[in-house]
């Protein structure tokens, strides 16, 4: 009888152990299922972009150059900055809002005949101008010959009729030419660093000397929106105003949401014609050029990004005083989709 009781107790214990093991397995299985569903839901809301290796990569004397692509777009990345993004199905159209806004300078001049681009990148502006403004004479200046080659090989740029490519430093070019322009686009500033000698009072004076009396200067300055970036923007504005007292500013957001909610491209227009920006005639001229397909269709909407408040006083930058830590600004990766940022170190 005692033996039966002992054997019965053992069976009960074995049954409890089996039930406990089965329950644990079910619990782990349920946890895995719930966790898996949760992960899939999170990934649906936060897609992770895994890019293939760069289709082109080179370390030039000036910077690291990489070209990446996905199903829709191709990217030119110089160090940590996205300098050009191109629609693969329509390589000429301007993808980035800041580049679209830069074209508003064309509406500030009655009929521009000659223009200058300082900073070539993937050739986005030059390609668009070649198609939409074929009679516009254009000088292009880029310091890095490897960037010019990448634009030609991977971004569909070719030197159009009336376009002249100059592979040299922007300031050296200005000192060695007597040409004067109706529009000058300055697009050489990255978010993490800008060339100090292209931010100074003396440099902007050289730029002004190459503008016609009714000429327009358009400047692109990337900003992460944090404290150091604001200080840098204040300094650039203060310096620009010592040469061009009248400027207008626009804060243009990129095409993607980023971890830095205040990140934007600051577009500055300088020169005598900028007083037209606040007049109805300017908006009407933009609309007219859009109808003629000589202005990006996005520009009328981007005009709402004009900065109304004045800029705080900043440091005036000169050839003798342009602090490196100030020009570093803030932020990390500039201009690309946030999910791509981790791949930039590959």
Image: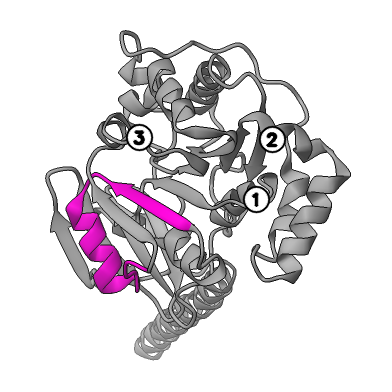
The vertical placement of 9 against 168, above or below, is: below
Residue 114 visible in the current orientation: yes
In the rendered image, residue 252, in percent from the top left (x then y), is placed at: 63, 46
Alpha carbon distance from label 1 to label 3: 26 Å
Which residue does the numbered mark 2 point to in the structure image? 273
The disc at residue 104 is 1
- Dot 2 crowding, Cα within 10 Å, few <14, some 14–19, many 20+: many
Q: Residue 42: x, y in percent?
A: 56, 68
The disc at residue 178 is 3
Percent position of residue 324, x then y: 31, 19
Q: Quadrant of the C terminus?
A: bottom left
Residue 211 located left or right of residue 165: right
Residue extending farthest to the front is 178
Estimate the spatial distance between the alpha carbons at disc 2 and disc 1, rounded to whole Å.
12 Å
Dots 1, 3 in contact, CB < 8 A:
no
Name the image quarter holding residue 1: bottom left
Query: In this view of the protein, which residue sits in the foreground, 217 or 136?
Result: 136
Between the residue at mark 2 and the residue at mark 3, the CA separation in whole angstroms equals 22 Å
Secondary structure found at label 2: helix
Q: SS for tag 3? A: loop
Residue drawn where x is 50% and y is 34% of the image: 211
Q: Quadrant of residue 339?
A: bottom left
Q: Which residues are magenta?
A: 137-160
In this rendered view, identify the residue nearer to me: 263 or 307. Answer: 307
**Residue 339 can be seen, yes or no:** no
Q: Residues within 10 Å of mark 3 (few under 14, many from 20)?
A: few
| Residue positioned 47% across, 81% down in the render | 29
Q: Is residue 246 left or right of residue 193?
A: right
């Amino acid at each position: 009888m005692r033996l039966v009781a002992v054997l019965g107790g053992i069976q009960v214990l074995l049954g409890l152990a089996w039930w406990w093991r089965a329950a644990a397995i079910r619990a782990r299985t349920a946890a895995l299922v719930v966790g898996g569903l949760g992960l899939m839901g999170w990934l649906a809301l936060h897609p992770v972009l895994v890019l293939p290796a760069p289709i082109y990569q080179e370390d030039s004397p000036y910077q690291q150059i990489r070209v990446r692509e996905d199903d829709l777009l191709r990217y030119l990345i110089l160090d940590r900055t996205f300098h050009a993004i191109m629609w693969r199905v329509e390589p000429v159209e301007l993808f980035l809002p800041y580049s679209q806004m830069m074209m508003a300078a064309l509406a500030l001049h009655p009929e521009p005949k000659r223009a200058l681009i300082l900073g070539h990148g993937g050739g986005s502006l030059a390609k668009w101008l070649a198609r939409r403004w074929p009679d516009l004479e254009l000088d292009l200046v880029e310091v890095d010959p490897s960037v010019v080659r990448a634009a030609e090989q991977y971004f569909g740029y070719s030197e159009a009729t009336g376009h002249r490519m100059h592979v040299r430093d922007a300031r050296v070019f200005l000192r060695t030419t007597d040409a004067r322009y109706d529009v000058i686009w300055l697009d050489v500033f990255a978010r993490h660093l800008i060339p100090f000698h292209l931010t100074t009072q003396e440099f902007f004076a050289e730029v002004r000397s190459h503008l016609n009396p009714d000429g327009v200067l358009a400047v692109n300055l990337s900003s992460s929106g944090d404290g150091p970036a604001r200080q840098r923007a204040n300094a650039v504005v203060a310096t620009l105003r010592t040469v061009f007292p009248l400027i207008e500013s626009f804060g243009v957001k990129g095409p993607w949401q980023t971890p830095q909610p205040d990140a934007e491209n600051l577009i500055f227009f300088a020169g005598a014609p900028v007083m037209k920006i606040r007049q109805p005639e300017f908006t009407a001229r933009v609309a007219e050029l859009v109808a003629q397909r000589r202005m990006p269709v996005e520009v009328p909407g981007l005009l709402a990004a004009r900065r109304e408040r004045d800029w705080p006083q900043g440091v005036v930058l000169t050839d003798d005083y342009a602090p490196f830590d100030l020009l570093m600004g803030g932020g990390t990766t500039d201009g690309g989709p946030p999910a791509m940022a981790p791949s930039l170190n590959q």
